[in-house]
Image: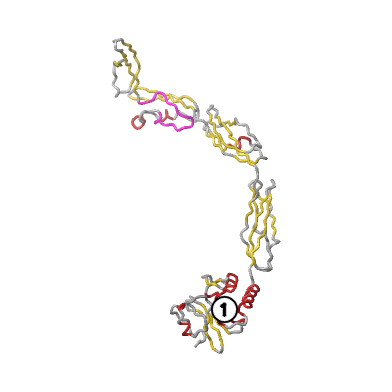
Amino acid sequence: MTVDVQNKPDVSKYGEYKIKVIVSDKYGNKTSKTVKLTITWLYDKVSVELGSAFSVANIVVDSERFGNLVDPNEIAKVDTSKIGTYEIQASDENKTYKCIVTVQDTTPPDLQLKDVEIWDDQTLSGGYKDFIVSATDVSGEVKTESSTEIKYGVLGEQIITITATDVNGNKQEKTCKLTIKKDTTGPVIYGLSTLTVNKHTSIDFNNGVYAIDDKNGTCEVTSDGSKVNVDVYGTYYATYTSTDLSGNKTVTSRRINVNHDQEDVNNKINEFYYNYCAGQDPVSIASQVRNKIKYSSNGGGQDPIWYGLTQGSGNCYVHAMIMQTMLQKNGYQSRLIWLPDESHYWNLVFYNGVWRHIDGTPSSNHTLGLLTDSQKAADAGLHGKMWDTSLWPAAE
């Protein structure tokens, strides 16, 4: 078939035209009809949503070219806060045009839901409404309802379907999840960091300790510190227990460090002295210190003798301090000596009427024996450095 048009209009001009359309088949049979063609700058019908913004751009083909042809008062007739039909008139070249604006509501409400978790012995106080975060619509009041029956006491997940309907019948349906769980977990006990105390002091085992249960909230905590002996230094453990209302129990422990005191240091010194150094000459004492206290880079902090005798290791300062203690317990006069940069420590001992160097650091770089100043200065471990000779008696 072929299609032909008679009375073709000038489409550059606005107006209404009657057009004759002729359709012919291949045998020459023809059918014709007359139709109306409207060429306009103003739409004849427009629909806008309730609550939406409305301007001249909604009703003209090109607002930049034709927007000034519409009186603003005509635009103001349209109230998008109400459903209804409005007629807008505009003129161009002494001809009046009309546009019918329909304010309609086809947009469903905005429905926001949340998932909910409850325990197997709980119910929802608000029913299905406990799942609703918000239900709003420009039309005003929104009606909500649920098509799901909640099965309380049934463990696991349930899918809940909720529908929101506005006053104009628009609906929004969404789903969310209800999880029903059983309480099988005990409280979590907090505040159980390692506690360090001095000897012979009392301990408040529950200070800063509390328990929180994910169902019952704050729970009571009991402690058992019967195995902690604050009169003897060492590491102990106190036991803590908390039980929730469902009978779930949590039992855990806390480390308690009881600090040593000078009595403990003296006991360690006596133990080392009587086992290895009692009645020995300075060289034998140095040999025992070298053999029993290995070398490490740790200086022992504020208590180098305790560190060395309990850990069995330490740096040159630890060895020198232990050496001095053992020498003095054997009745020898002894002094600590060190390089100006404190890179090495050793001892001076008064033996057979003269001062001599004696080094308890276990290293072939530090000669074992009673050394004069010149002999000690030649030690490889000194790296050519020299001590302040004005501070110590000469060992020549």
Residue 55 falls inside the magenta stretch: yes
Q: Residue at x 51, y 30 (%)?
A: 108
The outermost residue toward the bottom is: 353
Q: Which residue is mark 1?
A: 323
User: Which region shows up in magenta?
Assistant: 41-58
The colour mode here is: secondary structure
The tally of labels here is 1
Q: Which one is nearer the viewer's eye here, 155 or 137?
A: 155
Q: Residues within 10 Å of mark 1 (few under 14, many from 20)?
A: many
Q: Quadrant of residue 133?
A: top right
Q: Is residue 90 magenta?
A: no
Which element is circle 1 on?
helix
Using the image as rendered, state which of residue 86 and residue 362 is in the foreground: 362
Residue 389 vertical position relative to residue 11 in the rendered view, above or below: below
- Looking at the image, residue 394 lies above or below residue 262: below
Residue 32, given in percent of the width and then of the height, sits at 33, 12
Amino acid at the residue labelled 1: Met
- The relative height of residue 289 versus residue 120 in the rendered view (above or below) is below
In depth, the one of 165 and 59 nearer the eye is: 165
Which residue is at 69% across, 62% downward? 227
Give the image location of residue 275, x and y in percent: 63, 76
The image shows residue 218 at horizontal and vertical percentages of 66, 50
Location of the N terminus (image quadrant)? top left
Percent of width and height locating residue 208: 64, 58
Instruction: State the image quarter where residue 190 is shown.
Output: bottom right
